[in-house]
Every structure is written in structure tokens, then in C-alpha cells.
Amino acid sequence: MGSGTGIGKVRGLGSSKHGGKHWIDQRITAVGNILLTIWFAISLILLPNFEYETLAAWLSQPSVAVPLMLMLVCIFSHVRLGLQVLIEDYVHDEGLKFGTLILLNFYVVTAAAFGIFSIAKIAFTGAQV
Amino acid sequence: MVQNQARPISPHLMQYKWGVHMITSIVHRITGFILATAGMMTLVWWLAAIAGGVESYATFHTFAVMASEDATGWQIASNWFFRLVAFAVTYAFFQHFYSGLRHLVMDMGAGFELKSNRMWSQIVFVAAFLTTAAIALLVATRYMGT
């Protein structure tokens, strides 16, 4: 935190003009999650069984693979925003807070990438018997 | 980094009389954490297991769903662990879902009157409990045993 120029005094202290972005994004992803998880839950219930062949055939359809990828992106974005608030509220040590936030970002990006890759692999290569 | 420990702080949780809306609030956070960790890790594992082919899905099935007749002790323990996870995640999902709907309504400025705020907090718990019970019943009748 500088003591000289105006920008030096405010830099790092928070937002200007986009302070509501985190809050708005949390709501947008929430609405996305409502739609996508309802679709996902109903689809699972409507599946005749959970055998490998059934699931692989179901997941290889574009009309399933694309929404499911969107669901992972939407959920993990929501997770990132939500757990960030938990960490900021309950981890009081500045260093530990910073480290935990890094771990959170690594977790959501890695898990989302792994999940999306898995869906893409099924969609592009089909069932591996 | 420098932290001024002497800064005044607002009255903390224990200063207030607990109300159901406060329980709904903290449970929203706890269930969100459960979904973000146990829920999403299991979902991604499930997807990766299917992507890995028939054998890797069989491994997932052995540990997370139901081991075969000659199951080892570890596999049976793992099955029960994931049944518990499935139950907790199902409840957490519906609790967080209904509680989230309540939040979206309150974001519009509605539902802050003492009586209706209290009522909807209670409805969230009842609805989550009933939906979880319905799903548990569905799974039990369709996929487990006779």
C-alpha cells in the first residue's frame, strides 16, 4: 500500500465499479445449476439401468455431452465463488488464506478439466469394451 | 502481513439467540461444502471411470456401488462408505437447492418479514428431508435387492 500517488493508495484494496461481479456471478451460476442439475437428475432417473454400455451410449450423444460439460463448468464456477467466501470468512491468517485460495482454484480447474476430458473422450471414442 | 488484533469486532454468533433462519444459513454453507468436495469428486470419478472403459467402470462399481459375491472386507467397507456419501450428498443437494431458491427470492427483497422468513426456513428443511426420503425409497426399490 503506497502513501504517494492516488492509485498507490487504493491499489489492492478492492474493487472499483465491479464490486458486485462476484455476487452476480454466484447468482448466474446458481440459476444455471438449477436448470442443469434438474436435467441431470431427471435423465439419471429415466435411464433404464446403470450398466456400462447404457451409460457410455447415453454420454456419447451430443445432446447429453454438451449440457453435462456445461453443468461441470457451471457447478465448478459456483464452487469457486462459494468456497472463496467460506475461506475468506473462516480462514483468518492472511498467509493461510492466500494458500487455501490457491488450492481452491487449482482444485476447481483441475477437476473441471478432468471431468470435461472424460465426457469428451466418451463422446468422441464411444464405448470401450 | 500486519493484522491489528485490537480492532473492534461485531458481536459474534454466541451473542445472539439462535433462530431457524440462522441454522438454514450455516447449513447452506455446510451442504455447499459437502457438494463441492465429496459430491463433485465422486461425480468426476464416475465420469472418468466410464471414460476409462468397461474394466475401469467395473472397478468404480466394485468400490462405490456394490462389490461382487467374493468381496473383500475393504470393498464391503468402501460400499458402505459410499452409501453414506450418496445419502449425505443427496440430502445436501436438496437442502442446498431449496435453500438456494430461498436465497434467490430474498435477493429480490422478498421474504424478510419475521414470520414468513421463519416459515420458509422451516419449509426448506422439511422439503429437503421429504425429497431425500423419496429418492432413497426410489433407489431402494429399483436398485437394491428385490
Image (tube, coloured by chain):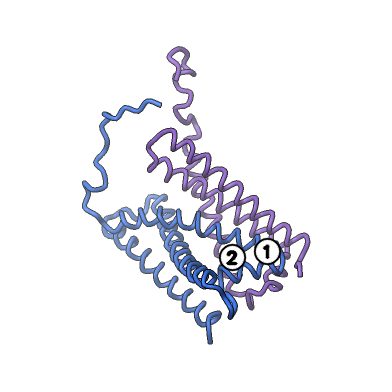
Chain colours: A purple, B blue
From this view, report whether residue A3 is shown above or below residue B91: above
Quarter of the image for residue B125 reads: bottom left
Residue nearest the observer in this picture, B9 or B55: B55
Measured from the top left, where is residue A74 in percent x and y? 58, 52
Would residue B16 be found to the left or right of residue A123 on screen? left
Check disc 1 and give the amino acid type: Val
Would residue B104 be found to the left or right of residue B56 on screen? left
Quarter of the image for residue B132 reads: bottom left
Measured from the top left, where is residue A46 in percent x and y? 61, 75
Nearer-N-terminus badge (1/2): 2
Query: At numbered mark 2, what does the secondary structure look like: helix, strand or loop?
Result: helix
Chain letter of mark 1 equals A
Does the residue at mark 1 contact the one at mark 2 (Cβ under 8 Å)?
no
In the rendered structure, find residue A64 and report the number of the disc placed on it: 1
Distance CA(mark 1)–CA(mark 2): 10 Å
Assess disc 1: are there few (<14), some (14-19) or many (≥20) residues with their C-alpha within 10 Å of its C-alpha: some
Measured from the top left, where is residue B42 in percent x and y? 56, 61
From this view, report whether residue A14 is shown above or below residue A4: below
Identify the residue position indicated by label 2 in the image.
A39
Assess disc 2: are there few (<14), some (14-19) or many (≥20) residues with their C-alpha within 10 Å of its C-alpha: some
* In the image, farthest residue toward the right: A125
From this view, report whether residue B145 is shown above or below residue A81: below
Residue nearest the observer in this picture, A81 or B5: B5
Measured from the top left, where is residue A93 in percent x and y? 39, 35
* In the image, farthest residue toward the bottom: B146
- The residue shown at (47%, 78%) is B137
Query: At numbered mark 1, what does the secondary structure look like: helix, strand or loop?
Result: helix
Check disc 2 and give the amino acid type: Trp
